[in-house]
Amino acid sequence: MKVLYFDTTQDWIQVLIANYSSESSLQILSEQTQTTPKESSYKLVEYIRSGLEKAKINKPDLIIVASGPGSFTGIRITVTTARDLSQLWKIPVFGVDSLEAYLAGIKGTEDATENSLLCLDGKQGKYYTKYKSESGFSDSLDLIPEIIETKIITNEWTPNNWYYTGNLPKFYPPTATKIEATNLNLSSILQYSLKLYFKTESNQNDYLSLLPNYIRGTYVDHK
């Protein structure tokens, strides 16, 4: 099965095409990563086209995307493109929570069981936040720093690993790891996403079922 994965929900474009088989390991056919703030609207489709050309296939059998949270515009571009291609190619499409995908794909931690905290800079003085422990992932939350600090101080969250985007949060240790496009393992993200995909019902993976994960809603909701 040929799988296309892409993500423009942050300040990067990531496009991966791979061959999946239950009998063998994931075979990477094409991979592109570039930090491109505010350029994904016109670069994503070209990256997908060139990726398919390099992989020597006309179309994939499945699309998987990071569906947010993240940049409002980036989420819209990712989800709209995925829905359009799913409808055009008549293939299933599946969305995975962006924060969960990143925690599953940080290079060097793919098999780690330690507790991890990820805070994506959501602007407006808030963070898109997810906590990973041995019991699994928390929901993706949109939190002000004071609430995150309270969870840490009260030991509700006890992270061993600290990850962030943007500027270092004031409640983070200086040794925290900044997530950038180049320190995410797309193969690990895709393998994790495929595990989730195979647990869903087939009627939940058509283009109409793919929804953006804005958390804060849209700009229209705030007017």
Image (tube, rainbow, N blue to C red):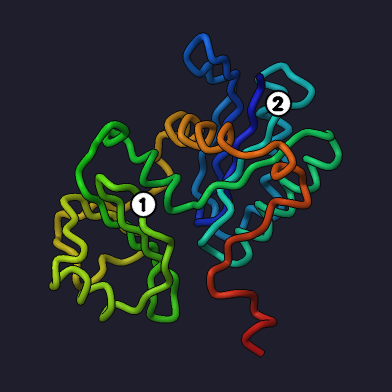
Residue drawn at (66%, 83%), measured in percent from left and top?
A: 221
For the point 20% across and 55% down, which residue is it? 176
Compared with 42, 108 (above or below) is above
Under circle 2, the secondary element is helix
Task: Determine crowd level at label 1: few under 14, some 14-19, many 20+ residues with C-alpha closer than 10 A.
Answer: some
Q: Where is residue 148 in the image (x, y as percent from the top left)?
A: 27, 72
Q: Position of residue 145 (x, y in %)?
A: 29, 77
| Viewer-side label of 1, 2 | 1
Q: Please name the residue shown 78% across and 33% down the image.
A: 91
Vertical placement of residue 28 versus 7, above or below: above
Element on which disc 1 rests:
strand
Q: Residues within 10 Å of mark 2 (few under 14, many from 20)?
A: many
* Residue type of the residue flagged with mark 1: Phe
Q: Cα distance, mark 1 to mark 2?
A: 33 Å
Image coordinates for residue 37, horizontal then vertical, percent: 54, 58
Q: Which numbered disc flags the more N-terminal residue, 1 or 2?
A: 2
Seen in the image, is 121 located left or right of residue 135? right
Residue denoted by label 1? 137
Q: Quadrant of residue 29?
A: top right
Is 125 in front, or is 144? 144
Q: Mark 2 points at which residue?
A: 52
- Amino acid type, mark 2: Leu
Residue 215 or residue 75, whichever sits in front? 215
Where is the N terminus found, in terms of image quarters? Answer: top right
Query: Is 124 located above or below residue 208 in the figure?
Result: below
**Residue sitting at x 25%, y 51%:** 116
Position of residue 59 measured from the top left corner of the image (x, y, whole percent): 77, 26
